[in-house]
Amino acid sequence: MPITVTTHSIGGASPSAPLYHTRLNVVLDNSYPTGGYLLGLQDRIGAGKAIISVQCRGVVTSSGAPDTRSYEYNATTDRLVGLTSSRAEVAAAVDLSTVTVEVLVTAN
């Protein structure tokens, strides 16, 4: 089952604050792919904007409690990578369907 990505909000870009902030919710699926989930962030924030930072926070979808794993954006591969507490990548095919990752992208 593929992941679902929704744009929660877009803000910024005023003359006094020329940064764009885009919040995405990424609902994960039941089979984690080796290397992480392809996000296509540049397409999601719009052409001509440079990504400055990406912050990720996993939460249990049903309760909103923090997930025990951590999540990072790999800019080289454009993928959302799941990491265990020992900072190893989550094993392939792990079921993460109960997790939503909140992603905050800052761009200019």
Image: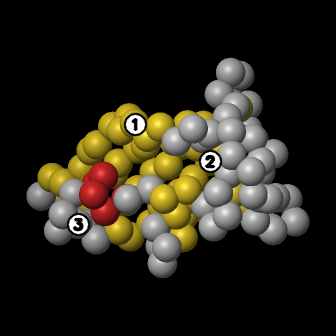
Q: Amino acid at mark 3?
A: Lys
Q: Residue 80's x, y, as percent?
A: 56, 59
Which residue is found at the position 75% from the left and 58% from the top? 92
Residue 2: x, y in percent? Answer: 52, 42
Q: Is residue 64 above or below residue 89?
A: above
Kind of residue indicated by mark 2: Arg
Q: Quadrant of residue 98?
A: top right
- Asked if the residue at tag 2 contacts the one at tag 3, i.e. Cβ–Cβ closer than 8 Å, the answer is no
Residue at the spot 61% in from the left edge and 61% down from the top edge? 36
The quadrant the C terminus occupies is: bottom left
Which residue shows up at 17% across the image and 68% down it?
48
Badge 1: residue crowd in 10 Å (few <14, some 14–19, many ≥20): few
The residue under label 2 is 57
Q: Earlier in the sequence, mark 3 or mark 2?
A: 3
Q: Check whether the beta carbons of the residues at disc 3 and disc 1 lie within 8 A of each other.
A: no
Which residue position is annotated with label 1?
Answer: 6
Q: Secondary structure at mark 3?
A: loop
Q: Secondary structure at mark 1?
A: strand
Q: CA distance from mark 2 to mark 1?
A: 15 Å
Task: Out of 26 and 49, give the one closest to the viewer.
Answer: 26
Q: Residue furthest left?
A: 15
State the residue at coordinates (40%, 36%). Answer: 6
Marks 3/1: CA–CA distance: 19 Å
Q: Position of residue 35 (x, y in %)?
A: 63, 67
Mark 3, residue position: 49
Mark 1 belongs to which amino acid?
Answer: Thr
